[in-house]
């Protein structure tokens, strides 16, 4: 079980980046994303992708992040540019149940203390979306990207165009 | 030489996501980011990070993307959820000079034809930031994240807090 906890989401300002966080979590093998701020529109967007592209990914918004972290049965991995090296931390994570915490702007000091691991995906400023993607890709040994979601829409790898199979319509086709 | 070309940037709407694209490019080993739309504020933000954290990363905004792709001396890799599998494509990329193309919303058909490679980082909808991060991490064999940028500010990996060394002030310290 992998849950991604997104802190500090401001619906007006962070709408697009938090959507990227949620869809990256889903595509890279997480089971759920929890967003501390309530955001019905974000929930609709993510559920729409799940409806079309498949899988059992779930989103919850509007929750107490302290309780969520404290109540987690497993290990809590906070991604931060200040943390210890990814390559050092990953082999030490033992639990099958991990909560991956990613913040927006400044993350409260408390998160560093409550987490089992503070892990940096490089010690340079970049992006929580990038950090989450690389963490999950490496943590799953590259396997998450190969997952078959068995959705209504399926994209078939194509070096020169777009091949989308729509099982709802019972036919495939070249969309581009 | 690795250049990231960002297409379809709308300064009001995509400000934050394009900033994430640019900083991810820098942190994961690219030399430059080129953004097709002019955006002085974005340039200032990225140059500010380079000034503080080091390296020779450059940003250019406001350029003709067709000319940029056509004029590229090397291979052009377009990241798209429709493309061929990452694990299949990466070993086939031969040039040391690659241009990595990432779009915002819908990318013109022409980009698929002008590119040497259309590569998918998973065939699920997620994020161009995530796709770029995983592509560069894998393309550089994980080495980009280990790069030393020799900047004024240097972050020392710390499992429990923040250690920032400011060479401009000639002293280090625990910032958290």
Image: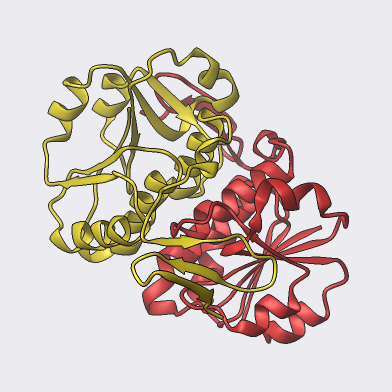
Chain colours: A yellow, B red
Say if B161 sits above or below B167 in the image. Answer: above
Which residue lies at the image location 72% right of the left edge and 79% below the top edge? Answer: B113
User: Residue A75 placed where, x, y %?
Assistant: 33, 18
Say if B77 sits above or below A33 in the image. Answer: below
Determine if residue A35 is in view. yes
Which residue lies at the image location 80% right of the left edge and 47% below the top edge? Answer: B91
Which residue lies at the image location 46% right of the left edge and 27% below the top edge? Answer: A119
User: Residue B9 placed where, x, y %?
Assistant: 50, 77
Closest to the observer: B139 or B14?
B139
Total marks shown come to 0
Q: Classify residue B100 by image quadrant.
A: bottom right
Determine if residue A6 is in view. no
Q: Classify residue A159 by image quadrant.
A: bottom right
Left/right of residue B58 with respect to residue B162 in the rendered view: right
Closest to the observer: B100 or B154?
B100
Quadrant holding the N terminus of chain A: top left
Which residue lies at the image location 35% right of the left edge and 28% below the top edge? Answer: B176
The residue lying furthest to the front in this view is A170
User: Residue B144 placed where, x, y %?
Assistant: 70, 40
Left/right of residue B114 with respect to residue B108 in the rendered view: right
User: Residue B149 placed where, x, y %?
Assistant: 69, 41
Left/right of residue A77 with respect to residue A81 in the rendered view: left
């Amino acid at each position: 079980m992998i849950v991604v906890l997104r802190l500090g989401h401001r619906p007006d300002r962070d709408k697009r980046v938090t959507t990227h966080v949620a869809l990256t979590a889903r595509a890279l093998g997480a089971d759920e994303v929890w967003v501390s701020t309530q955001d019905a529109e974000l929930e609709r967007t993510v559920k729409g992708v799940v409806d079309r592209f498949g899988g059992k990914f779930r989103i919850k918004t509007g929750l107490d992040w302290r309780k969520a972290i404290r109540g987690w049965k497993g290990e809590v991995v906070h991604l931060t540019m200040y943390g210890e090296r990814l390559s050092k931390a990953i082999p030490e994570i033992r639990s099958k149940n991990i909560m991956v915490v990613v913040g927006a702007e400044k993350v409260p000091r408390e998160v560093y203390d409550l987490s089992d691991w503070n892990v940096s995906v490089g010690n340079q400023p970049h992006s929580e979306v990038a950090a989450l993607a690389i963490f999950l890709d490496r943590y799953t040994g590259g396997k998450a990207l190969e997952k078959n979601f068995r959705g209504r829409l399926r994209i078939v790898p194509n070096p020169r165009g777009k091949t989308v199979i729509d099982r709802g319509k019972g036919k495939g086709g070249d969309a581009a």
